[in-house]
Image (tube, rainbow, N blue to C red):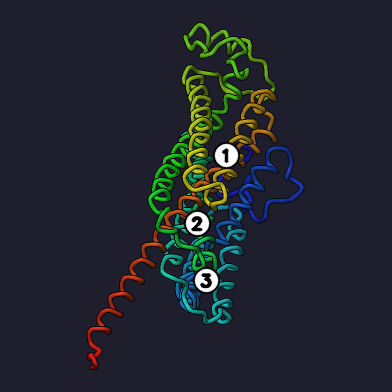
Amino acid sequence: MAVPDWPNTYGYNMFYFPFSQWIGGIFWEHSHRLVASLVGFFTLILAIWAHGRVGRVILRYLLFPLFAMASLVVLLSIENNTMQHVSILGGTAIAALVSSFFWPCLQPAPSLVRKLSLLALFLVIFQGLLGGLRVTLFKDEIGIFHATLAQLFFVLTLILAFVASRSWNDWKPAIPSSIHQIRIFSVLMSMLCALVIVQLALGAYMRHQHAGLAVTGFPLAYDTHLWPPSDQAFVDRLNAERIDLREFEPVTAVHIHVHMMHRILALFLFLSSLAFLIWVNKRLGHRHMLARSCTVWFGLLCIQGLLGAATVWSNKAADIATAHVLIGALTLAHASFMVIAARRSIYLAGKTRVAMHATTTSRHLEAREIPSTS
């Protein structure tokens, strides 16, 4: 919230904001907006690129009129600094028109890639709107959805990269003896993914309440409690003792409960993932690709837990807390990749079995048609 307006930055079009004013928290918030714009631009190009030669039509007859009309509407408005917006919108319109003449006549990508790229475009636009509404409406709840959707968008881009890669077509099918175990693997890993998403959402709730570190001390809460009290007298005493120049919001009983739920779920994830890793190595063997990937995933969980503890011990130091969020995103992305990889192996195994059955049936029919000779 270092920048109080949106889509402008202190009255400027965000792309014209003077570099001399990139100071303090403004630097981080404004940089966040510019990087988000770059991600949105790349996602738009990706969606157009996936449609091959149709991209010319999209650029020339959809994006060019859209941005040209938007720039005209802004030009006729009575807002201040409209020429900054007109230059950006009009420049984008001209760039779309010029690019349409040089757009390569490629074959469209497979249907699944096109659908995923359009879904990614929808999510990144929705994500940008949520970020803007978080500023204009000043609602912490929107920030929670904004943070969680960012994790899901990251997972989607990873899946899109996998589906569009050569590895997708060259992926090895599961051997018949392991299909049942891999199917169980995909179900259990999907459940763990769901738990990770809940854990990330709890973390987003804790961050966007702007209450700082609601529960200090680890592994014991406040260094003395297994489960801290949350009565009003304790909360009032806790807020009276908090001295911090960062002007955090007061801690509430809900903050304490959510923080402890975050800790308990982290412990449950660690124990269940350890049991799952043992099961995978026993059923699939430690040399199996999914078993090795699961080992890496468990390592990420351990790092994530250590960073969570370090966040508490450091009184929520920004760099450690940021690394905690980053490893959480990698944990979810890696788990999602394993689910897709497992389902892909099962699908290819079924496809291979159907092809072998069709070949065998064809040979039997050919054998019947060959006349016998004496």
313 displayed left or right of 76: right
Q: CA distance from mark 3 to mark 2?
A: 17 Å
Q: Nearer the viewer, residue 344 or 64?
A: 344
Location of residue 268 in the rendering, given as x and y in whole percent from the top left corner = 49, 29
Q: Nearer the viewer, residue 47 or 76?
A: 47
Q: CA distance from mark 1 to mark 3?
A: 36 Å
Q: Locate residue 211: give its quadrant.
A: top right
- Per the rendering, the mark at residue 49 is 3
Asked which secondary structure carries label 1, the reply is helix
User: Closer to the N terminus: mark 1 or mark 3?
Assistant: 3
- Per the rendering, the mark at residue 185 is none
Q: Is any part of residue 138 visible from this angle? A: no
Q: Residue furthest front?
A: 374
User: Closer to the N terminus: mark 3 or mark 2?
Assistant: 3
Residue topped by disc 2: 159
- Per the rendering, the mark at residue 298 is 1
Q: CA distance from mark 2 to mark 1?
A: 20 Å
Q: Locate residue 331: give its quadrant.
A: top right
- CB of mark 2 within 8 Å of CB of mark 1? no
Q: Is any part of residue 301 visible from this angle? A: yes
User: Closer to the N terminus: mark 2 or mark 1?
Assistant: 2
Location of residue 155 in the rendering, given as x and y in whole percent from the top left corner = 51, 51
**Which residue shows up at 62% across the image and 12% down it?**
223
**Which residue shows up at 54% across the image and 48% down it?**
334
What is the three-letter code of the residue carrying label 1? Answer: Phe
What is the three-letter code of the residue carrying label 2? Answer: Ile
